[in-house]
């Protein structure tokens, strides 16, 4: 079915797609605010504000949202990332109105009670501390921080501990009023509904909300990196990890799709299912060079579509009995190979076929479709997602070689070593 | 539109002469096909000093067959965006695969080849062994995994459920290729095998393909282990802490023995568990420990009723300073569930959640395949989904209280804590 797009007078973007495999509908709202919009002193505020939207309004007192969604057989959640804060509800189709009512209400009526904000502080600090238990989180935080000296992508979405300890309820309210408005948001519905009826209901509930967002502009582009950066991290455990992160183009850049092909060949096809693990990558070049050779126990690469230029991130777990230098040498050799020799047309075609399959799988759940329509609206537009396969198919061997030589030279990367204390 | 609920009319079931049970469900609105199932080759048959043997044997199935190398298998699957994996549990080795509908033949061919003709190449055994050892090394530094490992040992001392399916560094390191070959020969068999195929295919064609791929599998030397280990008793408080350097969060698991999946009281226990630690934002546990006290990012409960008597447990991740308060909060809710009947409206909410969410759980081929596999594994009947709402709604507040009193003892439990310091 075709996707229908509209814009309300107050600036709200509306994306609707009918899908009638099962009587299930998903409703998402995407706010164009993420960790990208945070300054030092308030890192983590976008994620904390997301939590606060579950803490009650007058229409839905604290706990009511979870209770009502569950008793109606639905699921819901919120996610905050670099570029967005999003909330969704997936419900039996005849109950989806609950999702629209929740989101239209908490867009402007969330209470942001100061006592609740302070109680939530400990929950978020607990979330951060749980992450700090993981060596890969610690390593990635250092690598990302070194890769971005200027751009706000340098910190983690969870925020720095010092800011989690000092952010005030007033800060949270200020954030809410600046970024949570119809003119800074996109709503998406996918599922078993009638488009004119759904659009009319969206207008009825969201239309009266006046435009109010005053998002501060983000203009701190990361200057080109002039040389390899390295971070060395020590911590508990017995396992070593290697991370190599290369600066990459934003989702809307012409080089992005050639990069998807390149990274598929290097580290495997991207998973396109929010709720499932990435597909296996055992036929990828880095797997063969690092894992087959018994240097690493595993290797994974990720290239997230982003609003501003971000990173292609490779992480390898050093195998027991091997060391970081050996794994890095093998990685370097494989990167050097792709810089020197063009990929084959066979590899190109396979990469495209793999991505086509993942794209087909991504349409099997309405929740996942809602995710991609919203995500692409924030980092690009829905055409970016809907023409995904076409744009991949247009990539040539020359395109791949060009982007390899633009983005994979050593000077463009940050390397991190996690050295276990043993 | 109304939901099509898989039923005896639409689930095509057949038993092949060699003991394989095949279930097929057509879903032509999806582009894919999903294949899941199990064989009775889990960790139950291994000795304690060979802990991890079933797991590595299962992992080796896709590391090369008599006609395909590891690289060839991966190339064949990944090049069309298909995937397949084997995973060992205590009783069974499960498998799961997915492909675009047009690649079902390839998926079945590789599944059948891996099951029937694994080659266990020596260099591949060494490779996988090292990967598992690295994973075990990582486990030793992971509070969540260590809490679970410790909890299982506490609740099931000397029992198969108390042993790690992945094994231990000493036991896995001591395994050799011949151990795997022997374990495979002794326990892999079509007898009792279940395979469920769901997706854009015709039931008739799927049956023909599966029969062609697996129908002639014979294993005269194998004796798949379908026994169920005895239950254990728990008549005291057992508590153990594991200290991991440099951690900023503690993981807590507290639990009890419960019942089997096929126990007639299962649905009563399931509702009790939903009220306790699932409904909405993690039920009463979430409300107490996270919402009211702000102590945890996650706290919830799970009822792991399986082929044998599995644990009923509560899990929380908290700041190390708050471990005792979190445990008290959990036990407080357990006591409350025992002392006071759940308000009728609260039980009705949990019932509405379980019955109302069915369309969501049956949306994908994976969801349907999982439901069908459960019907077969636990002998629930092909009409189980049609009876489901009735079973859920038949549970009363007295039933819930009885389950709490029978299984959740505030004085007898197993409690494991993994965090930065010994308590």
Image: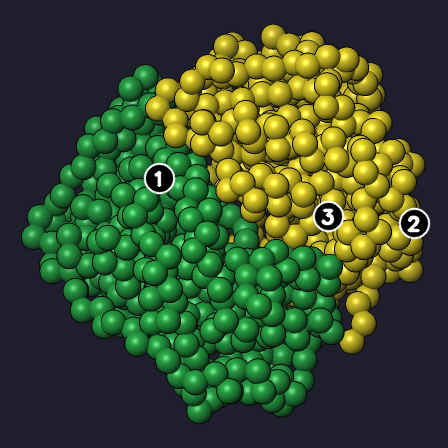
Q: Chain of mark 3?
A: B
Task: Give left or right: position of B202 versus B154.
Answer: right
- Say which chain is green: A
- Residue toward you, A419 or B117: A419
- Say which chain is yellow: B
Disc 2: which residue: B394
Residue B153 in the image: x percent, y percent? 63, 16
The residue positioned 73% from the left and 48% from the top of the image is B370
- Residue toward you, B214 or B408: B408
Q: Is residue A88 visible?
A: yes
Q: Disc 3 vs disc 2: Cβ atoms closer than 8 Å?
A: no
The residue positioned 89% from the left and 36% from the top of the image is B265
Labels 3 and 2 within one chain: yes
The disc at residue A137 is: 1
* Quarter assignment of residue B99: bottom right
Q: Earlier in the sequence, mark 3 or mark 2?
A: 3
Q: Disc 1 vs disc 3: Cβ atoms closer than 8 Å?
A: no
Q: What separation in Å lies between label 1 and label 2 (alpha carbons)?
A: 46 Å
Q: What separation in Å lies between label 1 and label 3 (alpha carbons)?
A: 32 Å
Between marks 3 and 2 in the image, the one whose residue lies nearer the viewer: 2
């Amino acid at each position: 079915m075709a996707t229908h797009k509209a814009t309300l007078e107050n600036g709200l973007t509306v994306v609707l797609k009918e899908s009638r495999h099962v009587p299930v509908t998903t409703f998402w709202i995407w706010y164009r605010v993420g960790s990208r919009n945070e300054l030092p002193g308030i890192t983590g505020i976008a994620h904390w504000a997301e939590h606060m939207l579950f803490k009650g309004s007058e229409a839905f007192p604290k706990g009511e949202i979870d209770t009502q969604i569950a008793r109606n057989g639905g699921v819901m959640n919120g996610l905050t990332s670099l570029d967005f804060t999003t909330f969704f509800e997936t419900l039996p189709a005849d109950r989806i109105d609950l999702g629209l009512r929740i989101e239209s209400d908490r867009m402007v009526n969330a209470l942001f009670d100061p006592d609740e904000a302070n109680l939530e502080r400990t929950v978020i600090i607990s979330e951060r501390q749980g992450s700090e238990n993981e060596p890969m989180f610690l390593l990635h935080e250092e690598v990302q921080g070194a890769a971005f000296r200027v751009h706000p992508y340098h910190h983690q979405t969870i925020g720095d501990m010092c800011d989690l300890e000092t952010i005030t309820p007033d800060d949270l309210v200020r954030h809410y009023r600046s970024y949570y408005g119809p003119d800074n948001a996109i709503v998406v519905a996918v599922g078993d509904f009638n488009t004119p009826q759904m659009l009319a209901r969206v207008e009825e509930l969201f239309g009266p909300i006046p435009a109010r967002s005053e998002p501060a502009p983000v203009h701190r582009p990361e200057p080109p990196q002039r040389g390899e950066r390295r971070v060395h991290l020590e911590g508990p455990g017995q396992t070593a990890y290697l991370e190599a992160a290369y600066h990459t183009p934003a989702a809307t850049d012409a080089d992005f799709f050639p990069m998807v092909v390149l990274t598929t060949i290097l580290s495997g096809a991207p998973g396109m299912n929010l709720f499932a693990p990435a597909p296996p990558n055992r036929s990828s070049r880095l797997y063969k060079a690092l894992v087959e050779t018994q240097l690493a126990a595993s290797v994974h690469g990720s290239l997230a579509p982003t609003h501003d230029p971000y990173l292609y991130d490779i992480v390898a777990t050093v195998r027991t009995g091997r060391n970081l230098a050996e794994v890095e040498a093998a990685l370097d050799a494989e990167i050097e190979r792709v810089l020197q020799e063009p990929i084959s047309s066979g590899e190109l075609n396979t990469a495209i076929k793999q991505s086509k399959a993942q794209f087909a799988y991504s349409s099997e759940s309405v929740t996942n479709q809602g995710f991609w329509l919203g995500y692409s609206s924030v980092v690009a537009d829905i055409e970016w997602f809907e023409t995904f396969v076409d744009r991949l198919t247009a990539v040539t061997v020359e395109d791949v070689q060009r982007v390899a030589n633009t983005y994979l030279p050593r000077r463009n990367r940050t390397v991190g070593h996690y050295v276990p204390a043993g | 539109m109304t939901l099509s609920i898989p039923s005896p009319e639409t689930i095509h079931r057949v038993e092949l002469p060699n003991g394989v049970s095949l279930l097929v469900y057509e879903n032509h609105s999806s582009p894919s096909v999903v294949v899941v199932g199990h064989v009775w080759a889990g960790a139950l048959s291994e000795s304690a000093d060979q802990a991890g043997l079933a797991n590595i044997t299962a992992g080796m199935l896709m590391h090369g067959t008599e006609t395909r190398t590891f690289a060839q298998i991966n190339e064949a699957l990944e090049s069309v965006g298909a995937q397949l994996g084997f995973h060992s549990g205590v009783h069974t080795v499960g498998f799961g695969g997915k492909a675009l509908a047009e690649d079902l033949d390839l998926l079945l061919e590789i599944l059948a080849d891996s099951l029937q003709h694994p080659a266990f190449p020596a260099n591949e055994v060494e490779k996988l062994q090292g990967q598992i050892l690295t994973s075990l090394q990582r486990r030793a530094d992971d509070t969540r995994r260590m809490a679970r490992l410790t909890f299982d040992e506490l609740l099931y001392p000397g029992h198969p459920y108390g042993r790690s399916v992945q094994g231990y560094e000493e036991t896995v390191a001591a395994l050799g290729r011949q151990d795997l070959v022997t374990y495979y020969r002794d326990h892999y068999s079509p007898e009792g095998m279940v395979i469920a195929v769901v997706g854009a295919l015709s039931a008739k064609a799927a049956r023909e393909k599966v029969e062609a791929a697996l129908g002639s599998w014979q294993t005269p030397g194998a004796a798949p282990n379908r026994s169920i280990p005895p239950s254990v008793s728990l008549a005291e408080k057992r508590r153990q802490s594991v200290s991991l350097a440099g951690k900023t969060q503690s993981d807590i698991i507290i639990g009890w023995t419960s019942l089997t999946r096929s126990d007639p009281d299962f649905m009563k226990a399931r509702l009790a568990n939903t009220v306790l630690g699932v409904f909405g934002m993690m039920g009463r546990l979430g409300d107490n420990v996270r919402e009211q006290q702000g102590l945890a990012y996650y706290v919830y409960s799970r009822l792991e009723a399986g082929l044998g008597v599995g644990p009923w447990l509560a899990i929380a991740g908290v700041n190390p300073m708050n471990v005792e308060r979190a445990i008290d909060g959990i036990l407080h809710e357990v006591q409350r569930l025992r002392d006071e009947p759940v308000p009728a409206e609260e039980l009705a909410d949990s019932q509405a959640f379980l019955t109302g969410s069915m369309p969501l759980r049956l949306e994908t081929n994976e969801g349907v395949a999982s439901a069908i596999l459960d019907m077969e594994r636990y002998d629930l009947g092909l009409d189980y989904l049609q009876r489901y709402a009735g079973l859920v709604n038949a549970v009363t507040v007295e039933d819930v209280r009885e389950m709490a009193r029978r299984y959740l003892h505030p004085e007898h439990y197993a409690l494991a804590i993994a965090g930065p310091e010994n308590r």
